[in-house]
Image (cartoon, rainbow, N blue to C red):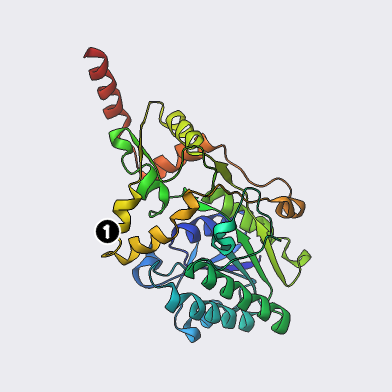
């Protein structure tokens, strides 16, 4: 039995990846900090460690064949956290002789990202977050070439799904689902890339099983769901079985509020991704593992809504329907 250490296993991505590796028959060590270590899924071995403590992290990852870095530092503090965390993960991987796997994002391509962006597309440091992600991946690439620490980056769009909060789905798009409202942050006909986390987690496990076939530093693209606002809205209505009123995000107001809210200010800086159509080409991924795991969007939304309890109970929805018909 092979062992995987999931860093940030209590987070939204880490939880999905940990469950996928467990289902695939791996021994899964879930590394988390403080009380979060007690929230891991059944079957995952809890390991409490602070990733900012290099010695503690190295000890937590001892014996791992694969280390999955899903640590998610505060969105408004990347400049102080992204590279130090990467260096600690590399130290732990080198000590264990493990392969590092990282969920990448589309920030690296900057304002020039387009539909069907592949792994060879030029990267652009148009934003601070893009520059940090580019620098982080360069750090892993150097370690792969100079120290033999194998690293695999699986790049994907915005996460949704699973039972952990703080995705665009619960924070924005369906936050008012109980009021029959659907909120879209971008243009209704603009294609946006999403990754349903259970599908992405399965992809990580399948790629890990074939890691020896890859070069020391490899980047793969996960296509996921590349859909417009119209398509996402239609899938959401199908998932809940009723009409949903449309609304949009007041980005101008959010930009003003962001002057006083550091996290919102960072969100606004990256809002160009809701105006620029984009998707990821997954040919290289499918050449390795076969067809990408893919749950139909309306079914993925049905599962996500249930997992996060975003909708009213069925009895309440039926009562509202009867009231509307009576009126």
Mark 1 closeness class: few <14, some 14–19, many ≥20 residues within 10 Å: some
Q: Residue at x 73, y 61 (%)?
A: 210
Instruction: Where is residue 79? Give x, y as percent.
Output: 44, 76
Q: In which quarter of the view is residue 76 placed?
A: bottom left
Mark yes or no: residue 250 visible. Answer: yes
Mark yes or no: residue 43 visible. Answer: no
| 157 on left or right of 99 | left
Q: Nearer the viewer, residue 317 or 28?
A: 317
Q: Secondary structure at mark 1?
A: helix
The image quadrant where one finds the C terminus is top left
| 266 on left or right of 234 | left
Instruction: Where is residue 202? Give x, y as percent.
Output: 60, 52
**Does 178 appear above or below 287?**
above
Q: Nearer the viewer, residue 147 or 118?
A: 118
Q: Residue at x 57, y 37 (%)?
A: 296
Give the total number of marks visible in the rendering: 1
**Does 59 appear above or below 257?**
below
Toward the bottom, the furthest residue is 55
Q: Residue at x 40, y 40 (%)?
A: 306
Instruction: Where is residue 309? Give x, y as percent.
Output: 35, 42
**Does 50 appear above or below 246?**
below
Q: Residue at x 53, y 71 (%)?
A: 131
Toward the top, the furthest residue is 326
The image quadrant where one finds the N terminus is bottom right
Q: Which residue is mark 1?
A: 257
Q: Nearer the viewer, residue 140 or 247?
A: 247
**Does 239 appear above or below 39?**
above
Instruction: Where is residue 54? Give x, y as percent.
Output: 49, 84
């Amino acid at each position: 039995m092979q062992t995987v250490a999931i860093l940030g296993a209590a987070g939204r991505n880490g939880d999905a990846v940990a469950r996928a590796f467990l289902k695939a028959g791996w021994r899964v060590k879930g590394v988390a900090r403080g009380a979060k270590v007690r929230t891991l899924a059944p079957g995952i071995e809890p390991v409490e460690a602070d990733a900012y403590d290099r010695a503690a992290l190295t000890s937590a990852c001892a014996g791992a064949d694969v280390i999955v870095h899903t640590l998610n530092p505060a969105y408004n503090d990347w400049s102080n956290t992204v590279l130090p965390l990467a260096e600690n993960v590399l130290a732990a991987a080198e000590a264990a002789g493990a392969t590092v796997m990282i969920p990448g994002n589309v920030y690296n391509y900057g304002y020039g990202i387009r539909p069907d962006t592949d792994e060879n597309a030029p990267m652009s440091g148009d934003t601070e977050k893009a520059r940090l992600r580019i620098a982080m991946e360069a750090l892993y690439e150097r370690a792969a070439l100079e120290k033999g620490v194998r690293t695999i980056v699986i790049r994907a769009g915005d996460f949704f799904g699973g039972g952990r909060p703080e995705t665009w789905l619960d924070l924005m798009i369906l936050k008012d689902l109980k009021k029959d409202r659907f909120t879209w942050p971008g243009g209704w006909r603009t294609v946006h890339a999403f990754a349903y986390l259970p599908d992405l987690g399965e992809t990580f496990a399948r790629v890990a099983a074939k890691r020896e076939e890859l070069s020391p530093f490899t980047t793969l693209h996960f296509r996921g769901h590349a859909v417009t606002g119209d398509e996402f809205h239609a899938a959401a209505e199908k998932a809940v079985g009723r009409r949903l009123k449309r609304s949009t995000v007041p980005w101008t107001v959010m930009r003003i509020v962001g002057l006083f809210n550091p996290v919102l200010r960072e969100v606004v800086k990256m809002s160009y991704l809701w105006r620029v159509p984009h998707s990821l080409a997954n040919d290289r991924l499918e050449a390795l593992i076969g067809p990408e795991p893919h749950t139909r969007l309306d079914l993925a939304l049905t599962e996500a809504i249930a997992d996060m309890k975003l909708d009213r109970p069925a009895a309440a929805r039926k009562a509202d329907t009867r009231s509307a018909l009576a009126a």
